[in-house]
Image (cartoon, rainbow, N blue to C red):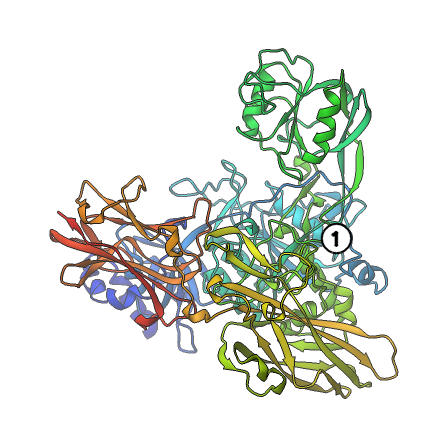
């Protein structure tokens, strides 16, 4: 009772009468508050509060009661399992630093908003992806596994449990859905000042993402066959219905869903969501704690691969979490259109319709044309001076939006529109509500023949409801272009492994069509969660660490057909999952991956065969290989295979979204441009039930310039043979590192980029900063780009005497992601005016005296010590005037 009363007193000091007391503690408390970059969308006045934990610490309910006693503070959630903490909302009168000054508060995060990862285009597939390459088919059929007895919690948009292939049941006897809760409801709109949270009695899906994920895991057939159809499931709905094109949630709601999944006793928690890039973020930290509690957490690595390196998201980067990348499906079977032209009949695979209200269905032949618009182009953006009445129009992608193209042909009387891609592959058109004709897309490859044939004379098209066709996918088994790249900000290998995620046909809410095809690491994640269930059913004694190691060890590395080398582990992890091999494995290697973030420069020590290399950059790592067969000894042979090296920079130093690779072709290259692996003995024998340590030396590619900032990698290949057996088996361990001193790596963009820079309010660079005059009514901007994630970036104002007077508005940020070269977050910045913040939280501002000033920008380098000024990369502007 004494402890509780002390808390009440401390929290009571948040009242207006005690604000002076709270402010006296703000300097220390400010360091407890995480400050996200300005481009991170946060919920106003909402925070996740982590509390000190220990045997003498008060309960979260005691803290909650005390916080709730203040009329300007409301507790919206309590966390007892993930960590000792609360979700709180405050008025504008209460700052995060004041909350942090309360006795017992350890850390405070602003609540971020989240949207579902963008689902890349997918065709309307009606044939399930193959389970054979992943070993799932053999596990289900030969080993008769199904995931029975394993509990899997899914944190997502909900599930249409009425779907016949998902059980058509909810919490009844023998129903796969025995657990689940709705934490958000149907009225949540993140654009509203105070989004409404109104949970429903059950987590019914109004979006489709969660139902699609559920089918990949639990589909009962006959159309969708899940990876673990016999497991027991829980659905924890944390995402809204679609509002203005977004399906949204927030940190506090997602954490409630994860905590509920843990409290319901699930063995596996599957998370097809993400955002941010640091393992210290609240959701990542919570998932890492679940791993320590013995729960397998599987998370999507992200769909930002088109933005290049450092795009792995949270919670995938959480310590111990199994991060999952995506490979494309092998076969594409889907709805097709049949074209009849003077040259004969042609079939073309169709995208998903631009609108669910207007499916592209024509049971009989309809005239089809490829019209020329007013400007004489095939884009259809300028409109038409001809009638398209009763016809389907075929137009080219580009110049204007899909909606504008559809509107133009609709105005000309067309009854449908087919948009063909202007790059290889197929795309899903997004069509506005003003379009009342069906719209679909076809590939550039199909269009080249179709458009040419249509031009030769009258042609027709039909697309009956059940007309389908099967086509081999040219990219089947390869990494999906959208799949995010690692590494993590601390150079950890992300993802851990990959699974089918591109063009996946699965269940969908009955009201939205029952089935749909989506692409994303969101689809690959439940696939891996299902393989974990099969592995746990077969080998229930395995620890979380063992499961992670076995799945990675038994994966199949992917080959880049362009270079002849292996795909870099920062894109594919260990490679394509193979659960059958994991189940049958009689050996295990740990750690499951080797991240080379610390290296030595100089002659190699302890390996005579490498002395001739002279001074090189190298690292030494230890792996342990265990023979888990209790009756037979095991011979082990070790060699290695090289992966592509990757760089964010072109040869001229310009940064690019698409990573540059070395080598560029299968042609033989100098060995010093490739990483090298050495061990003391490439062959060893391990007795039954025993293990041995192996020292592995990794030499960075000295023939690649360190100034070009390459990331190298490859795979350790272990060939295993047991006594009296002829057949061998293989296990692998991926390795990856930075070709240079990672601690000294620059995080700000290269000088040739023209950044950092001072600009006017329209982001036009100021040619002569010495002539800049800033005032209350005439502000400027500091713009910069982070090429590498940085834990701390600060922008301060320095006076003529060299003294720092404060932080620029938006000038202090923590846990910064890399800025991609293009897109909405391509630049970071701060405002330059006649005021500065005297605290990192930007809660208290002062007006600066007139005079000469300059901006000092400091960004913490990788693995740097925040208290050591030498660990920062700095930049100083020229001097300017403030009046």
- Quadrant of residue 856 within the rendered picture: bottom left
Quick one: label 1, few (<14), some, or many (20+) residues within 10 Å? many
Residue 562 vs 415, above or below: the answer is: below
Q: Residue 573: x percent and y percent?
A: 63, 63
Q: Residue 763: x percent and y percent?
A: 32, 42
Q: Residue furthest left?
A: 850
- Residue toward you, 227 or 551: 551
- Residue toward you, 854 or 630: 854
Residue 232 vs 332, above or below: the answer is: below
Residue plotted at (21% across, 55% down): 854
Q: Is residue 731 left or right of residue 198?
A: right
For mark 1, what is the residue?
Answer: 226
Q: Is residue 411 visible?
A: yes
Residue plotted at (53% across, 19% down): 382
Screen quadrant of the N terminus:
bottom left
Q: Residue 869: x percent and y percent?
A: 30, 70
């Amino acid at each position: 009772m004494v402890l509780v009363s002390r808390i009440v007193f401390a929290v009571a000091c948040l009242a207006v009468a005690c604000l002076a007391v709270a402010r006296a503690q703000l300097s220390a408390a400010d360091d407890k508050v995480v400050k996200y970059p300005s481009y991170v969308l946060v919920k106003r006045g909402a925070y996740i509060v982590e509390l000190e934990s220990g045997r003498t610490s008060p309960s979260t309910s005691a803290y909650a009661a005390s916080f709730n006693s203040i009329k300007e503070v409301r507790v919206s959630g309590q966390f007892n399992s993930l960590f000792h903490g609360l979700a709180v909302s405050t008025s504008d009168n209460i700052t995060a630093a004041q909350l942090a000054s309360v006795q017992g508060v350890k850390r405070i995060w602003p609540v971020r908003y989240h949207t579902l990862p963008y689902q890349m285009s997918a065709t309307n597939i009606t044939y399930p992806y193959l389970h054979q390459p992943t070993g799932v088919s053999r596990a289900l059929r030969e080993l008769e596994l199904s995931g029975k007895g394993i509990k899997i919690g899914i944190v997502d948009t909900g599930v249409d449990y009425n779907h016949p292939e998902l059980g058509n049941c909810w919490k009844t006897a023998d129903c796969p859905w025995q657990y689940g809760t709705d934490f958000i409801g149907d009225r949540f709109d993140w654009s509203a000042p105070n989004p409404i949270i109104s949970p429903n009695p059950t987590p019914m899906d109004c979006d489709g993402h969660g139902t699609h994920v559920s089918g990949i895991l639990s589909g009962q057939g006959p159309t969708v066959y899940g990876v673990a159809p016999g497991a027991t499931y829980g659905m924890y709905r944390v995402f809204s219905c679609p509002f203005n094109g977004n399906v949204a949630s927030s940190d506090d709601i997602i954490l409630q869903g994860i905590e509920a999944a843990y409290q319901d006793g699930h063995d596996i928690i599957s998370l097809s969501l993400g955002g941010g890039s640091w393992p210290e973020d609240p959701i990542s930290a919570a998932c890492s704690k679940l791993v320590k509690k013995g729960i397998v957490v599987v998370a999507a690595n992200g769909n930002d691969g088109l933005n290049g390196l450092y795009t792995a998201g949270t919670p995938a980067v959480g310590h111990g979490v199994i991060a999952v990348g995506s490979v494309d499906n092998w076969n594409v079977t889907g709805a097709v259109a049949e074209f009849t032209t003077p040259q004969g009949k042609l079939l073309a695979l169709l995208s998903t319709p631009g609108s669910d209200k207007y499916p592209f269905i024509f049971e009989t032949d309809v005239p089809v044309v490829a019209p020329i618009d007013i400007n004489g182009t095939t884009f259809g953006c300028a409109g038409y001076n001809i009638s398209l009445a009763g016809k389907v129009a075929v137009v080219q992608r580009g110049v204007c939006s899909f909606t504008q193209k559809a509107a133009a042909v609709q105005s000309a009387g067309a009854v449908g529109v087919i948009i063909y891609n202007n790059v290889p592959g197929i795309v899903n058109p997004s069509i506005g509500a003003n379009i009342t004709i069906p719209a679909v897309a076809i590939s550039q490859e199909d269009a080249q023949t179709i458009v040419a044939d249509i031009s030769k004379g009258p042609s027709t098209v039909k697309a009956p409801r059940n007309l389908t066709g099967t086509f081999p996918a040219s990219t089947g088994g390869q990494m999906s272009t959208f799949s995010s790249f690692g590494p993590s900000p601390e150079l950890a290998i992300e993802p851990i492994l990959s699974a089918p995620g591109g063009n996946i046909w699965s269940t969908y809410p009955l009201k939205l069509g029952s089935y749909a095809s989506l692409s994303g690491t969101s689809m690959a994640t439940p696939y891996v969660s299902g393989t974990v269930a099969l592995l746990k059913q077969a080998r229930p004694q395995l620890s979380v660490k063992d499961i992670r190691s076995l799945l990675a060890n038994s994966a199949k590395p992917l080959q880049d057909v362009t270079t002849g080398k292996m795909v870099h582990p920062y894109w594919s992890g260990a490679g394509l999952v193979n659960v059958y091999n994991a189940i049958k494995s009689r050996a295990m290697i740990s750690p499951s991956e080797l991240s080379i973030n610390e290296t030595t420069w100089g002659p190699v020590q302890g390996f005579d065969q490498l002395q001739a290399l002279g001074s090189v950059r190298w690292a030494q790592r230890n792996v342990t290989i265990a023979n888990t067969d209790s009756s037979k000894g095991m011979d082990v042979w070790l060699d290695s295979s090289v992966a592509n090296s990757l760089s964010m920079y072109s040869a001229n130093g310009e940064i690019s979204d698409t990573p540059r690779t070395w080598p560029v072709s299968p042609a033989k290259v100098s060995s010093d441009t490739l990483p090298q692996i050495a061990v003391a003995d490439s062959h060893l024998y391990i007795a039954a039930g025993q293990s041995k340590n192996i020292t592995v030396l990794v030499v960075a590619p000295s023939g690649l310039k360190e100034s070009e900032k390459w990331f190298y990698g490859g795979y350790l290949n272990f060939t295993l043979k047991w006594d009296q057996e002829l057949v061998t088996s293989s296990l692998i361990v991926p390795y990856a590192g930075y070709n240079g001193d990672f601690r000294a790596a620059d995080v700000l963009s290269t000088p040739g980029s023209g950044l950092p820079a001072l600009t006017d309010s329209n982001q036009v660079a100021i040619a002569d900063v010495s002539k800049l005059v800033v005032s209350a009514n005439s502000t400027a901007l500091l713009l910069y780009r982070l090429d590498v994630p940085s834990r701390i970036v600060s922008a301060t104002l320095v006076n003529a005497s060299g003294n720092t007077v404060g932080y620029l508005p938006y000038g202090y940020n923590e846990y910064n992601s890399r800025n991609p070269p293009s897109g909405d977050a391509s630049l970071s910045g701060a405002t330059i005016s006649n005021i500065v913040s005297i605290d990192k939280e930007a809660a208290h501002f002062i007006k600066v005296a007139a005079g000469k000033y300059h901006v000092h920008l400091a960004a913490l380098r990788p693995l740097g010590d925040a208290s050591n000024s030498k660990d920062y990369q700095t930049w100083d502007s020229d001097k300017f005037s403030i009046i």
